[in-house]
Amino acid sequence: MRGKGVQSVRSGSVGDLICKVVIETPVNLSDRQKELLQELDSSMGTGAEAARYRPKEQGFFDGVRKFFDDLRG
């Protein structure tokens, strides 16, 4: 993250913060656990409502189209 790191003692400039994110995907779920995940998925809705919770699901060209649609008013 640019500019979010530790401040240099010599120059006073702020460095970059490097993060490591580890995401663990659950495996060997019970039937109840699968049911709960499906319930969570359905509770997020569809279409524009779901995009609020899943910003990466939207493709690049969808974002470009939305940008130009917003410009038109």
Image (spheres, rainbow, N blue to C red):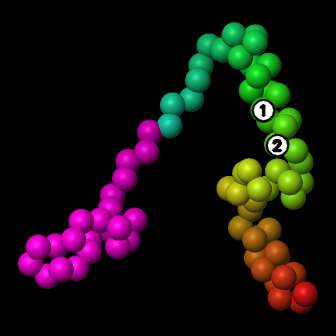
| Residue 18 pos. (x, y %) | 33, 58
Majority SS type along the magenta span: loop
Q: Determine contact: label 1, label 2, CB under 8 Å.
A: yes
Q: Residue at x 77, y 56 (%)?
A: 52
For the N terminus, the quadrant is bottom left
Q: Residues within 10 Å of mark 1 (few under 14, many from 20)?
A: few
For the C terminus, the quadrant is bottom right
Q: Residue at x 80, y 68 (%)?
A: 62
Secondary element at image label 2 = loop
Mark 2 lies on residue: 44
Residue 12, by quadrant, is: bottom left
Q: Look at the image and tell me whether residue 57 can be seen.
A: no
Q: Of residues 58 and 42, which is closer to you in this image?
A: 42
| Residue type marked 2 | Met
Which residues are drawn in magenta? 1-22
Marks 1 and 2 sit apart, C-alpha to C-alpha, by 7 Å
Mark 1 lies on residue: 40
| Residue 22 pos. (x, y %) | 44, 39
Q: Residue at x 80, y 35 (%)?
A: 41
Q: Is residue 57 left or right of residue 2?
A: right
| Residue type marked 1 | Leu
Residue 71, by quadrant, is: bottom right
Q: Residue furthest left?
A: 10
Q: Of residues 25 and 59, which is closer to you in this image?
A: 25
Secondary element at image label 1 = helix
Give the number of the disc on residue 69.
Answer: none
Q: Is residue 2 highlighted in magenta?
A: yes
Q: Residues within 10 Å of mark 2 (few under 14, many from 20)?
A: some
Q: Is residue 73 left or right of residue 62?
A: right
Q: Is residue 11 highlighted in magenta?
A: yes
